[in-house]
Image (spheres, rainbow, N blue to C red):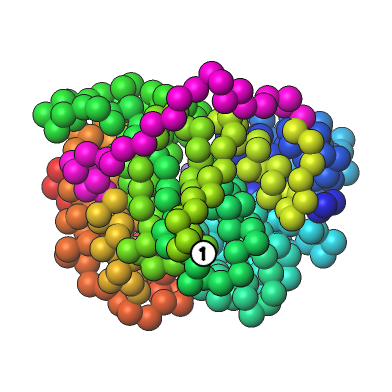
Amino acid sequence: MRKKLSILGSTGSIGRQTLQVAKALGVKVLALSAKSNIKLLEEQIREYKPEYAVVFDEILALRLKNNVKDMQIKILSGMDGLCQISSIEDCDIVLNALTGMIGLKPTLKAIESKIDVAIANKETLVVGGDLVMNYARDKNVKIIPVDSEHSAIFQCLQGCREKKSIKNLILTASGGPFWDKTEDDLKNVTIEQTLKHPNWSMGPKNTVDSATMMNKGLEIIEAIRLFGISEDKIKVLIHRESIVHSMVEYCDGSIIAQMSITDMKIPIQYALTFPDRTETFTDNFLDLTKFSLTFFEPKPYLSKCMDLCRSAVKTGGTAPVILNAANEEAVRMFLDKKIRFLDIWQIVEDAIKNIPVFKTLSLDDIIDCDLKTREYVNRLDV
Ligand code: MN3
């Protein structure tokens, strides 16, 4: 088991749960980081006593430094800080729980430093998945998924020796709050309705993505990157119970599924203990007699965002970067009550249609395209 951990994004939902898992497993937390929530970060510093903490915002980093001056800790800031805590010499694993493509550079830094990465930051895989996976292969670094679906597939693939024996990867989706709504209903849905996710508790960006099913679309891209499987071999099924977290269908007709209660601490724990397993500390075992499992195809109008993702990944190059940046901006505009729910996918579609795609993909290309897309979306008259 891995003994020393650095957490990128420790004040978010995944970060907080990672700390609980680390504590239960006796894993030493070397570094923590937050965008701006220095109050919670200070509590975490006092409880976990890391050697480093990063606050992305420089001014807030200075304030935190002052607040914890009674402690032995280095307070860093900005992207430099994130890269520094991704390359601590005696660190075994970096858990990247950042939101957005800001997580890409620190991930590459961890790989460069030959540190395994547990990745919960899907945008990093969506925009820079090829870069990350190729670099990790070169450096012999493991990229371990934390996202529940990908952790499930990763678990179902253990023991699979040949890619050609995989017929399909089947991603399950809760369908979000609007899985049974008509297209008309969706025209007037509110933020409050959108933020009510039936089964998982997540941050607002992820919850909106779950309602538009953009989340599942991004997860299709994520699966393509992580497992090197072509787009046409990735299926999505609505599974309201969120018991089966995803499946692998093999060429001999067997389907292997991973099931558990809906608790992110389970995939987080697996990422930290892989390839071993340790006892759950939540004591929350699944009682299969209490459920019946159902699966069905998503409705076509809820597949629009997924279709955009499939076509972006087929186009390749910077197309997924445009998709991701346009979606992040559109979701922010929706949360700021500037646009309506159905505008989200239209803005993304508009950006993909109108922004030129470059076939090459370096870190600079990604950052450049990301910025241009955000500017484009913010200039749109909505
Ligand atoms: Mn997921």
User: Farthest residue in the top direction?
Assistant: 290
On the rendered structure, is 174 left or right of 245? left
Q: Which stretch did the figure color magenta?
A: 281-305
Q: Residue at x 66, y 43 (%)?
A: 268
**Which quadrant: the C terminus?**
top left
The amino acid marked with disc number 1 is Phe
Number of residues whose C-alpha sits closer than 10 Å to that of mark 1, classed few (under 14), some (14–19) or many (20 or more): some
Q: Secondary structure at mark 1?
A: helix
When asked about the image quadrant of residue 90, the answer is bottom right
Instruction: Please name the residue that numbered disc 1 is placed on.
Output: 227
On the rendered structure, is 31 left or right of 369? right
**Would residue 302 be visible to someone looking at this image?**
yes
Q: Residue at x 75, y 33 (%)?
A: 280
Along the viewing direction, whichever of 338 and 232 lies nearer the viewer: 232
When asked about the image quadrant of residue 177, the answer is top left
Q: How many marks?
A: 1
Q: Check residue 295 for magenta coloring.
A: yes
Is residue 336 shown above or below 151? above
Place of residue 379 in the rendered image (x, y in percent of width and height, measured from the top left): 20, 53
User: Farthest residue in the front direction?
Assistant: 252
Along the viewing direction, whichever of 146 and 234 lies nearer the viewer: 234
Place of residue 258 in the rendered image (x, y in percent of width and height, measured from the top left): 57, 43
Is residue 329 shown above or below 314? above
* Dominant secondary structure (helix, strand or loop) of the stretch shown in magenta: loop
Is residue 136 shown above or below 51? below
Place of residue 107 in the rendered image (x, y in percent of width and height, measured from the top left): 60, 62
Along the viewing direction, whichever of 78 and 107 lies nearer the viewer: 107
Place of residue 176 in the rendered image (x, y in percent of width and height, measured from the top left): 35, 32
On the rendered structure, is 139 left or right of 52? left
Along the viewing direction, whichever of 56 and 154 lies nearer the viewer: 154
Q: Is the CB atom of the residue marked by disc 1 within 8 angstroms of ligand 1's nearest atom? A: no
Q: Residue at x 61, y 69 (%)?
A: 161
